Amino acid sequence: MRKFSFLFLCFAFFMSATFFITSLEAYAVTDRCPRHEIKTTLKAKRLKTKFQRSSMAGINEYLNTHSVAAFVDNPLDIETHYKFELKDIGYGRYCVRLQEVKAYYISAPLIVMPTDYKSNSCEYEIILKHEKRHLQVHYDYYDKSVPQYEAFLGRIARDVPIPPPVTTQEQVNQVQEAIQDYFADKFFTHVGESILEMRALQQKIDSPQEYLFTNRKIDRCKAKEDAEKSQNPKVFIDHKR
C-alpha cells in the first residue's frame, strides 16, 4: 500500500506519465495480462469550522500583505492509497493488477478574526459577515466536489493501462509505481483544476468594490459610536467637599 499527498503531487505529476511509458517499454511483451478490476472509494469528511483571533498586524504579517482585517483558511487534505495483487500466469511470470484505490478527502476550514475589535462590536460583525461569504464558497465547493471526485476516480479506473507480465520483484515495484503515478497524475490534475475554479470565486469576493463598500460600513460604525458617546457623556461626580 502506498499513500499519495496532493501537496507533493502538485510538483511531481508532470513527470509521472513519461516514467510510466518508459518503465513499461522495458519489458518484453509476451502474453497480455488481464484487465484490472479496480474498486474505488472516496471517504470525505468536513470538520467543524474553527475560529481564531489575531491582531491585524499579525494577520498581515502572516499573509505578507498590509490591508487585510481577517481571513478564511481552506485547507483540503486529499490522499490516495493503492492496493495491488500479483497474478501468477506460469513460467515465472506475473501480472501486476491494481485492486483498489481509496481517496481520503478532509476539509478543515478556519476563520481568523482580528483582536483589534471587540467580538460584539459593529466593526467585528461587518468583517465576520464578509469572511462568512468566503466560508460559504468553500462549503459549496466542497459539497459539489465530493461526488465529482468520486466519479472521476471511477473513470480513471476504467482506463488504467495494462502492463506486460513481469518476472522479478524489481519489475513488480517499478510497475506498481508507474501505475500509481499514472492514476495520481490523472486524479490530482483534476483536483488542481477544480481548486483553481474555487479560488477564482473567492477572489471575486475580494474585489476593490467590495473592499471599498466594507471599509465605508466600518467607517460608519465609528461615526455611529462617536455619536452615541456624544449623546451619552460620562458623568463625573466630585466627592470632595
Image (cartoon, rainbow, N blue to C red):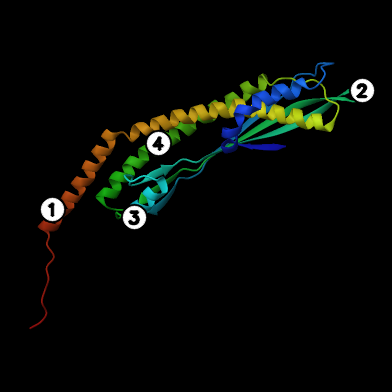
Q: Is residue 240 above or below residue 139?
A: below
Q: CA distance from mark 1 to mark 3?
A: 23 Å
SS assignment at label 4: helix
From the top left corner, tell me how far across and down residue 53 is, in percent: 39, 53
**Please, what secondary structure does the residue beneath circle 3 have?**
loop
Instruction: Please tell me which of labels 1 and 2 falls first in the chain.
Output: 2
Residue 51 to residue 166: above or below: below
Residue linked to disc 2 = 91
Which of pointers 4 and 3 indicates the residue nearer the eye? 3
**Residue type at numbered disc 2:** Tyr
Read off the residue under disc 1: 227
Q: Residue furthest left?
A: 241
37 or 177: which is nearer to us? 177
**Residues at marks 1 and 3 touching, judged by CB atoms closer than 8 Å:** no
| Residue beneath the point at 39% across and 34% down | 202
- Real-space Cα separation, disc 3 to disc 2, in angstroms: 72 Å
Q: Tell which circle, 4 or 2, labels the residue nearer the N-terminal end.
A: 2
Q: Look at 69% across and 26% down and name the residue there.
A: 19
User: Mark 1 Cα within 10 Å, few/some/many (few <14, many 20+)?
Assistant: few
- Of badges 1 and 2, nearer the viewer stands 2
Q: Which mark is residue 115?
A: 3
Crowding at dot 4, Cα within 10 Å, few <14 / some 14-19 / many 20+, comes out as few
Secondary structure type for disc 1: helix
How far apart are the two marked residues, 1 and 4, measured between alpha carbons?
34 Å
First along the sequence among labels 3 and 2? 2
Identify which residue is drawn at 11% across, 57% down: 230
Q: Look at mark 4 in the image and give the residue it sits on.
A: 136
